[in-house]
Image (cartoon, rainbow, N blue to C red):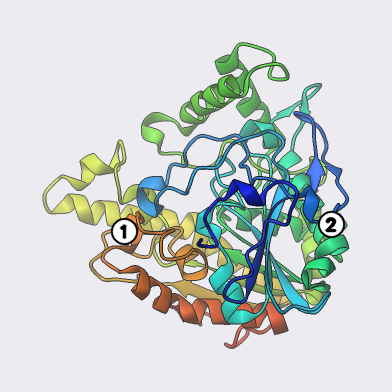
C-alpha cells in the first residue's frame, strides 16, 4: 500500500503509520476542539489510540483545481482540528528539526491531510520531521460578526497547532526547539501574520514564505463587516444554526458578489483581520515584526508568473480577451505580469528588505517554469509538486504537462534539498538577501 492511500483499518485503535521506505506517517491526530465560531481548546496528545481517519474542514472545491489537479477527497467535518506527522522511521525522540506546513487555498479550501501534501519524499531525502495541519476555513474560520463570531479563528487554530508541536513533537522524533513554520499562498500569508503576533514567539525561529499575497494585506474591520453583511444576506438565517451545506452555499454567493463583475477582484473575502485578536492592528503588527526580526531566519519568494494560474486558464474576462488575434494574448500576458508584481512580488521584496534591515537572515528565491511548452508557465502553486506528493498525486496537474511523474520528481530534488538544509541549519545554501538587492536564487 502506498503511503498516501487511505486505509480505514489504520484509523481506529492503532497508530496510523507506515513503516516503509524509512518513513512513518501518523495521520488524524487531534490538536484542538472547537464549537462552531468558538475559540479552539487544546487537546493533549493521548497516544496512537487517539488517531482517527483524516478529515478536511468544510469547503467547496478550490478554484485552482483545473490548474493544479484535484486532491483525493476526504470526509469533511467541523471537528477538523487535526494534523499529520511524517517522520524518519529511525528518528530518536526529540532529535530531528521540524517543519510545520500550513496549506494554502485562499482561506477557502485545502487540508493538511491532502495527498498533494504527502511529505514522505521530502522527509526521506532530508531527514526532517514534517507536520501538516488543518485549520477552519472561510466563514467558519474568518467571519467577523459581533455576538456570533469574533473573527481570526483559523489563525488561532494554527497557533494552537504550533503549541501542540511544542509540547508533543518530541514523541515523534522532532526537536521542539528547532521548528520552521512554512506555508504557501494563504498559508504563507498566515505565516507572515504570525511573525507579528507576540504569542507565537518561541514557537518557531525560522519561516518559509511561499507566494504570500502581500498585495492583499490583512482585512480591515470595515471590509470584514462588509463581507459579513454580504454573507448574512446570502444565508438568510442564523449562521450558528444553519447547516454546513447552507453555510457553504451562502459563502460561495458572498465570495462571487465581493469579487465584482467578471470576478476581477480575486482577493480572498474571508481572511485574517487586523486589529482582531490575536492579530495586532497594522502599525503594531509591523512594530512587532521589526522587534522580532533579529531572532529570525526567513526564506521568502514567489513563482515567476503567479497570475498565470488565475488568468491563464478559463476565465470569464481574460479568456475572451485572449481569443482576440494578435493583441489578445499579449494584453493578457501584460496584465498577468502587472497584477502578479503588485499582488506578490513587490510585497515580497518590501518584506524581505524590512526583515533584513532589522537583523533577520533573509533568503530570496524565485520558481521558474518547469517546461517551456506549458501554457501556464511558472504559475501560482507550481513549487508544490517540487516539494510534496508521490507519483500519483499530481497526475492531473495541467501546470506540469508534458512532464512525467519521474521528471517532476527529479526537478524537485534541488528544492527539497534546499528546504531541508534551511530547516536543519537556517541556511538554504545561497547568499543572504541585503536590503535593496535584486539578486534572487532561481529554481528549479
Q: Along the line of sight, which residue is nearer the eye, 357 or 224?
A: 224
**Label 1: element kind:** loop
Point out the residue furthest to the top here: 236
What residue sits 30% from the left and 48% below the top? 313
Q: Kindly check if marks 2 and 1 are in contact, taking CB atoms under 8 A apart as contact.
A: no
Q: Is residue 348 visible?
A: yes
Q: Earlier in the sequence, mark 2 or mark 1?
A: 2
- Quadrant where the C terminus sits is bottom left
Q: Is residue 436 visible?
A: no
What residue sits 81% from the left and 32% below the top? 38
Q: Is residue 281 above or below residue 182?
A: above
- Dot 1, how many residues are within 10 Å of its Cα: few (below 14), some (14-19), or many (20+)? many
- Residue corresponding to mark 2: 163
Point out the residue furthest to the left here: 325
| Residue 22 x, y percent position in the rendering | 62, 76
| Residue 270 x, y percent position in the rendering | 62, 37
- Dot 2, how many residues are within 10 Å of its Cα: few (below 14), some (14-19), or many (20+)? many
Label placed on residue 376: 1
Amino acid at each position: 500500500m502506498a503511503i498516501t492511500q487511505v486505509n480505514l483499518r489504520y484509523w481506529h485503535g492503532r497508530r496510523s503509520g507506515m513503516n516503509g521506505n524509512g518513513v512513518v506517517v501518523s495521520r488524524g491526530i487531534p490538536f484542538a476542539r472547537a464549537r462552531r465560531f468558538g475559540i479552539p481548546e487544546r487537546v493533549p496528545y493521548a497516544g496512537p489510540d487517539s488517531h482517527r481517519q483524516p478529515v478536511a474542514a468544510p469547503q467547496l472545491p478550490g478554484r485552482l483545481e483545473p490548474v493544479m489537479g484535484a486532491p483525493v477527497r476526504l470526509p469533511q467535518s467541523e471537528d477538523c482540528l487535526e494534523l499529520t506527522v511524517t517522520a524518519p522511521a529511525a528518528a530518536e525522540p526529540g532529535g530531528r528539526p521540524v517543519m510545520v506546513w500550513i496549506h494554502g487555498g485562499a482561506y477557502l479550501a485545502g487540508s493538511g491531510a491532502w495527498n498533494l501534501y504527502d511529505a514522505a519524499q521530502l522527509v526521506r531525502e532530508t531527514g526532517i520531521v514534517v507536520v501538516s495541519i488543518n485549520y477552519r476555513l472561510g466563514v467558519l474560520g474568518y467571519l467577523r460578526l459581533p455576538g456570533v463570531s469574533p473573527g481570526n479563528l483559523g489563525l488561532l487554530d494554527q497557533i494552537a497547532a504550533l503549541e501542540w508541536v511544542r509540547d508533543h513533537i518530541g514523541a515523534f522524533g522532532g526537536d521542539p526547539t528547532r521548528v520552521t513554520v512554512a506555508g504557501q499562498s494563504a498559508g504563507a500569508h498566515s505565516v507572515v501574520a504570525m511573525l507579528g503576533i507576540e504569542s507565537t514567539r518561541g514557537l518557531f525561529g525560522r519561516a518559509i514564505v511561499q507566494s504570500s499575497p502581500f498585495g492583499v494585506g490583512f482585512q480591515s474591520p470595515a471590509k470584514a463587516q462588509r463581507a459579513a453583511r454580504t454573507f448574512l444576506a446570502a444565508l438568510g438565517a442564523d449562521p450558528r444554526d444553519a447547516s454546513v451545506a447552507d453555510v457553504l452555499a451562502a459563502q460561495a454567493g458572498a465570495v462571487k458578489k465581493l469579487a465584482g463583475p467578471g470576478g476581477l477582484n480575486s482577493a480572498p473575502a474571508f481572511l485574517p483581520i487586523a486589529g482582531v485578536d490575536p492579530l495586532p492592528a497594522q502599525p503594531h503588527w509591523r512594530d512587532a515584526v521589526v522587534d522580532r526580526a533579529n531572532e529570525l531566519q526567513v526564506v521568502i519568494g514567489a513563482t515567476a508568473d503567479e497570475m498565470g494560474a488565475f488568468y491563464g486558464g478559463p476565465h470569464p474576462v481574460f479568456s475572451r480577451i485572449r481569443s482576440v488575434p494578435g493583441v489578445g494574448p499579449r494584453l493578457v500576458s501584460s496584465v498577468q505580469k502587472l497584477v502578479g508584481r503588485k499582488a506578490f512580488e513587490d510585497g515580497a521584496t518590501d518584506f524581505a528588505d524590512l526583515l533584513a534591515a532589522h537583523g533577520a537572515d533573509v533568503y530570496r528565491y524565485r520558481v521558474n517554469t518547469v517546461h517551456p511548452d506549458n501554457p501556464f508557465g511558472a504559475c501560482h502553486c507550481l513549487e508544490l509538486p517540487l516539494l510534496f506528493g508521490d507519483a500519483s498525486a499530481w497526475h492531473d496537474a495541467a501546470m506540469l504537462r508534458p512532464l512525467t511523474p519521474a521528471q517532476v520528481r527529479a526537478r524537485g530534488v534541488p528544492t527539497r534539498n534546499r528546504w531541508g538544509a534551511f530547516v536543519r541549519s537556517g541556511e538554504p545554501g545561497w547568499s543572504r538577501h541585503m536590503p535593496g538587492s535584486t539578486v534572487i536564487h532561481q529554481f528549479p
